[in-house]
Every structure is written in structure tokens, then in C-alpha cells.
Image (spheres, grey):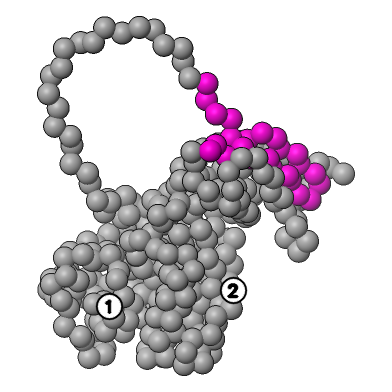
Amino acid sequence: MSFTAGNGAQSNYHFYPSGRESAGLFVHLDGDGQYGHNNPKSTYALGGTNGIVAKAHAQGFDVLSAKTPAQDNTWWTACSTNTRYMNDLLSHIRSANGSGETWFSGFSGGSEFLTGCYLPTQANTVGANGAVVFGGGGRPWVKVTPFTADTLASMSMHWVTGLDDTAANARDGYDALGKAQASEEYYAAAGFRTSGTWPEGVDHYNIGGRFGTYLGQVLEANQVQQPEPTTTQEPEPTTTQEPEPVAHEWVADVQPGRYHANITVDVPADADRRTIVWVYGPRGTYWYEYLFRRGTGTVQIGDRGDWLSPRTSYRYEVVNGGTVQASGTFTTASR
């Protein structure tokens, strides 16, 4: 989708709804060149069952991947312009979809923008609850707006950079590990809750395909934990045998063709109104369609310009209320 900010900066974004009515918002900013954003179906960053989209969905977040409006395809080289663009885009997404808890992530140049430019001036007003900083980061290079007590209490920051992501191993001499560790040191000293993960054998290149895995670990570890309910010992009740409930069948029918598949879903009356049907194919490819209704409805997966492939196996998931309610497989026809 295309978006133009109030300052005239223009670019595009991908938005992936989670299917949860009270979803949070997870915002990802790619590195220089924007490869992950430009190839959203690739398992490099966004796509696949272990990608950023799937892992954030599993934790109840809608996902926004924003491409820099800068002509050089970087986030960090145009601080003020990109900050205004980011704020206007967030306002647009939130007004259209709502949002609960908000998290950011970045890779390389996207991480430098977050830690060096954006959060130092916007952390108090953007309403972020956390950030996951991949492949670098850095100390602020702009004048920092002093972080408020509310910001420090509500927001945590987490760095993930491989031990091999050093200047010696980089084609351009970029010391991502050094920048990441210096960045964490700065924000920890400023009063943020921080963590650093420095995996062995990971560098600036082979971290691709692992973003979602690390992201899922951070989000799961930082969920708000509900207190254990206090219980009192009650006498054993006398019970009568009740008939076992019949499980609701969410998927009524799957009809694969050669280049598409029709999936009929039966959404119960007490379920959320928004249902997402995901289909995952080989090499990290995926499709999705959604229904905004209860009862029976059919979605077509695969259309002109983005067909499924003949004689190919696919896996589908039906997501409602942030939970996978049904899953299965199908194979497209040969002709």
C-alpha cells in the first residue's frame, strides 16, 4: 500500500492483520536496500511459518512493515524526514485498525534509525512498549529528549546480533556487534530494561531466516504475566456423567483447483467477527484472505498475478481471536 506523509514523503507499506480484535501493533523497519520488505513472501524476514509475521501473529500482534521513503533506500540517513513519515504512518494505521501494545523492530540500518534517531526523540510520545534491535543499532546522534519515568517503566529494549557480525567479517567493514553492545550499554544506563542476545556462528548475512525465531522468543518472554489465582480446598462434588461436547468444525470444505483453492469456513456465532485464512506453500510463500462475518463464508486463495502452482502441496490455517482454530493440507490439481 502507498502512503504519503504530511511532509510529502512517500513510500509503501505491508500490513498483516492478525485476526484478533484487540491486537497489538508490531512495526518492522528493514535494513539498507530494504530486501526483506521488497520480498515479503521470502523466509528471509517476513514470510514463512518462522518469519516475523507468523511469530508476531502468534503473540497477538498485527504487523506493519514500513519501507523508507528515502531515495537511497535507507532509514538512518534522513532522520527528520523519516521520523515525520513514521509518525504519520503510525497515526494512519492506528486510526484505521486500532492498536493495543506497540513494539518496534529493525535490522541494520533500520536498527540505527530506531536507536540513534527515532526513539531518542519520540520514545515519550509514540506509545511504544518495546523494541527488538537486530544486527546493530547505535548510540543516539541527535539531541535526546529526556526519557520520562513513564517511558522507562513501560518500555523495554532487546538487542540480537551475532558474535560473528563484526567489522572483520563484513564486506563494508560495518561493526554491527560493537554498535549493538554500545547501544545496549547506553539505553541500560538511561534506565531502560534491556537484554542482549549474542548468538554464536551468526553474522550480518546468515541472520536472515532467523529474525522471527528470535523475535518470538523476546515477545513470549515479555508478555504480561497474570498472577496465579489463589485457591481454597473445596470438598469433592458429586458428579454425574455429562455427554462430551461435539467439537465445532471450522472448515466446511476445501476445493483446490489448478491455480487456486476455495476454502469454506464456518465461523461460530460466539467467535470474533474477523477470521484470517492463511495458506503456506514451498520456499516460504504464503497467501491470506479474511472474512468479516460469522456463519459460513468462502475465500479464494490464489488470483490473477499471484496464482498457486499446479500439483503442489499447501498447508492452511484458520485464525480467529488470535488462535489457530483449524489447519490442514491440500494439493492443487495437475490440470
Left or right of 29? Residue 143 is left
Identified by mark 2, the residue type is Met
Per the image, the residue denoted by label 1 is 125
Per the image, the residue denoted by label 2 is 1
In the rendered image, the residue lying farthest to the front is: 269
Q: Would you place residue 149 above or below residue 221 in this image?
A: below
Closer-to-camera residue (335/169): 335
- Residue 100 visible, this orientation: yes
264 drawn magenta: yes
Q: Quadrant of residue 329?
A: top right
Left or right of 230? Residue 32 is right
- Residue 115 visible, this orientation: no
Task: Specify the segment rendered in magenta.
Answer: 246-269
Identified by mark 1, the residue type is Thr
329 drawn magenta: no
Left or right of 200? Residue 226 is left
Closer-to-camera residue (59/241): 241
Q: Position of residue 28 (x, y in %)?
A: 43, 68
